[in-house]
Image: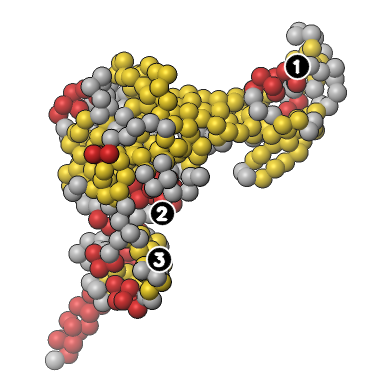
Amino acid sequence: MKKFIRIFDSALAVLASVIYCFVAVGNAFLPDRIVTYSPSDVSFSNMYSLDSSEYEKVDYQGNKRVSTYKSDITLFGIIPVKEADVSVQQKKKVYVSGESFGIKLYTDGVIVVGTKDVDTSNGTCNPAKDAGIEKGDIIVEINGEKMTSASQVENILNDNNGKSYKIKVKRNSNYKFFTVEPMYSPSQGCYKVGLWVRDSTAGIGTITFFNPENQTVAALGHPITDVDTNEIMPILDGEAVKANVTKLYKSKAGEAGSLCCDFTNETIGTLTENTQNGIYGKYECEVNKSLAYEIASPQEIERGQAQIICTVDGDGPKLYTVEITRVSYRENNSGKNMVVKVVDEELLEKTGGIVQGMSGSPIIQNGKLVGALTHVIVDNPQKGYAIFAQSMVEESENVT
């Protein structure tokens, strides 16, 4: 009898340890916020599911349920793992694209992309850096005058007889003021402050969808960052134009390929938002309404076969087969919600996998839009990361 009790106790201890591990893993990796269209359908595997009983207690407001309530995610439908905020929404549809397009952006302020030493009669110095200005700062004003272009900044700084400048910059959403004392450079015959600045950028990407609710265009699935500072570029205004693929450099292990495009004069829309979840604006073009797809909630996405829509040659957007190999619900890593592997032989032959310029390519699974490509995994370009479509749709609804 004692032997049986010892065996039972040991088995119970092992079972408790296993359950504890599953609870700890679920608490770490399951989401704190769930957006769904039907709480009863939410499950993260055969082990974790949402307790939908709380949904039945929610009061009606007009003809709609209250959008948000709290509920438990449980292990095996019994053991509480963590509490989550659940948002129940109406099903939505967007018009998917997959077209390559040209991006023209002008920044809201002028970005400091670097500082430079100035040669003086007493040696070298760096007036801008010494004053406290840093790479990535956004110059908003100089001597009270609003700055809108790099040429404006250069003209003001180059027209100097040694007087100091009062410079207002934006850094990490906060404003700071600096006094910069220019230094005379005998070799250049003028006063210098040692600043490199930029006010615009251009590139190519892929349009993910058009949202008919507010005529919004959504693309990329990740922000446009400055090549020198790696900071998100604040948009003053921007333009999306049609682009034609003219050349393609294939990806290979350790080296990401890229699309080359010619911009046309045909405008797709204006760009107003540059966010962690992509770039957004208002579309001004005719859209193909036959390409209407329902948005999948993250919990509907499955590991397995899917399709991407992308443009890699002059034939326009085409469907190619991929596999979703991983799904992650971690909210602090939105650009890497999924790992996608290209398995389509035609696409692999053309591109070697995922290339730069394919960011934003919509991903379709089970007849729904589930996400968009964001980054290539350079060491293995057959694979790349993707963002949930739901995150991009929510971002697009904030565009005014």
Residue type at mark 2?
Glu
Q: Mark 1 points at which residue?
A: 158
- Left or right, 81 with reference to 302: right
Q: Name the residue under label 3.
A: 67
Q: Which of marks 3 and 2 is nearer the N terminus?
A: 3
Q: What element carries label 2?
A: helix
Is 214 rendered above or below residue 149?
below
Q: Residues within 10 Å of mark 2 (few under 14, many from 20)?
A: some
Q: Is mark 1 on a helix, strand or loop?
A: helix
* Image quadrant in which you'd find residue 221: top left
Q: Which mark, by number, is residue 331?
A: 2
* Image quadrant in which you'd find residue 377: top left
Q: Residue at x 64, y 22 (%)?
A: 150
Q: Which mark, by number, is residue 90?
A: none
Is 137 rendered above or below residue 266?
below
The mark closer to the camera, 3 or 2, is 3
- Left or right, 337 with reference to 166: left
Q: Residues within 10 Å of mark 1 (few under 14, many from 20)?
A: some
Q: Are marks 2 and 1 in contact (CB under 8 Å)?
A: no
Quarter that holds the N terminus: bottom left
- Left or right, 64 with reference to 135: left
* Image quadrant in which you'd find residue 209: top left
